[in-house]
Amino acid sequence: MTKPKLIGSIAVPGDKSISHRVLILAGCCKGISHIEGLSPAQDCESTANCLQQLGIAIKTQETNGTKNKQSACVSIESPGIKNLAAPQETLFAGNSGTTIRLLAGLMAGQPFTSRFDGDESIRKRPMARVLDHLEQMGTEINYLDSEGLAPFTISGGNLQGQEFTLKVASAQVQTALLLAGLQASGRTTVHLPGIARDHTTRLFKYIGIPFRNGNGETYHAVSVESLDEPIEPFQYKVPADISSAAFFMVAAACLPGSNLVLTNVGINAGRTLVIDVLKRMGANITLLNERIMANEPIADIRVIGSDQLIGTNITHDEIASGVDEIPVLALAGALCKGSFSVKGASELRLKESDRLQLIANNLKAAGADITELDDGFIIAGKKNIPGKSFWHTHLDHRLAMSGLIANLLFDNPVEIEETNSTAISYPSFAQDLKSLLG
């Protein structure tokens, strides 16, 4: 069977993780900020919809007479962090854990009550890791159904700065606490046990929000104090999302004859697991035109297809730099020469689905030799995977996109449960993938 190739160049949508943060921080500024290249993901739309309930106006500006979400400039007009309006309705996060956790930090400092909720998957995802810390700062949390889960209310204001040492290197929890700290008396310090994406502090520096870090450029400890002056509005261009690019990178690396360039991709040190792992597996990957854009490192990434990658081990210390990329990296592992293992990834059981279980079940059904662990899996790689099986997604966008990549890599296509969920992070994924197949 002759497998396809990925040929050409593509600009994947704006970084979802950065888009959430830049939306929220623009909403904290007083005046009108202009953002180019925001992610068109449904998750980011959830953040924008919540911000609009706080009296923040968000408008997509027309380009050449059309509103192209992927390239359009968005204006965000806000009264400033000290003049936000009390929401009249529930702040509904949809499927977005980033939305509900980061906005919880913002609302903790506001002198009114906000009600939070989300879809069925959000109601299963742990919130106590954020809300317990916010309670220590003085905010009042009321769980409306199950302890530690959405829906809940936050009655904020009168926060006191605290020092937190997190057990897990979570950029979401860190950002939520820093947003609260910008509205608290005294100093708030957040210590991380290891490296994580530092988009928030890079944005702080770019916008001019004062902060201190304790360990140089790694930002393992970050401190903020209450904002004395209004934050000035800003202009920003969002780099392409490495988590979205990862699917194309894995596919191209595993398909001989592929020659793919992904442009303007963010290569933040806390996000490069997919690059590091594929290089260890022998993939032909080159970073071109490395540069800094809006205080974020970016590059064009060239991937040349290989005959067969070699196995590797992904350890606990690495997981924070690419936990969302584990499902698609498992496809490379299934087809590698040797053994491929992931450990320390129990966080994947608490995502939109139990991703560890779905990865193991889907790959096993397709003919891979995989053993599920409590915190990961071990795969004995094969040259060929038969496929021709059912691919469960449980409405998880990462699993749906991985299924579409599996159809390129396996001997026979799989029957994917659904692909509509790809809109959660990458609405045009299927079309963009098809465009590279020549």
Image (tube, rainbow, N blue to C red):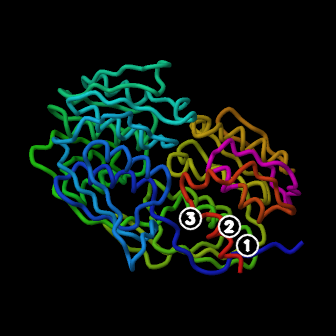
Q: Looking at the image, is mark 1 or mark 3 nearer the viewer?
A: 3
Q: First in sequence: mark 1 or mark 3?
A: 3
What distance separates the C-alpha of mark 1 from that of mark 2? 8 Å
Comparing 230 with 318, the one in front is 230
How many callouts does the rendering have? 3
Q: Amino acid at mark 1?
A: Ser
Q: What amino acid does circle 2 point to?
A: Gly
The mark lying in front, picked from 2 and 3, is 3
Residue placed at 36% from the left, 29% from the top? 115
Q: Which residue is mark 3?
A: 245
Sequence-first disc among 2 and 3: 3
Decide if residue 320 is on the left or right side of residue 75: right
> Residue, x 79% and y 55% (percent of image)?
338
Task: Find out whether the residues at labels 1 and 2 contact each other: C-beta distance under 8 Å.
Answer: yes
Look at mark 2 in the image and give the residue it sits on.
282
Q: Where are the magenta residues, as a range? A: 379-402
Q: How far separated are the C-alphas under marks 2 and 3?
A: 18 Å
**Mark 1 — residue?**
306
In the rendered view of the protein, which quadrant contains the N terminus?
A: bottom right
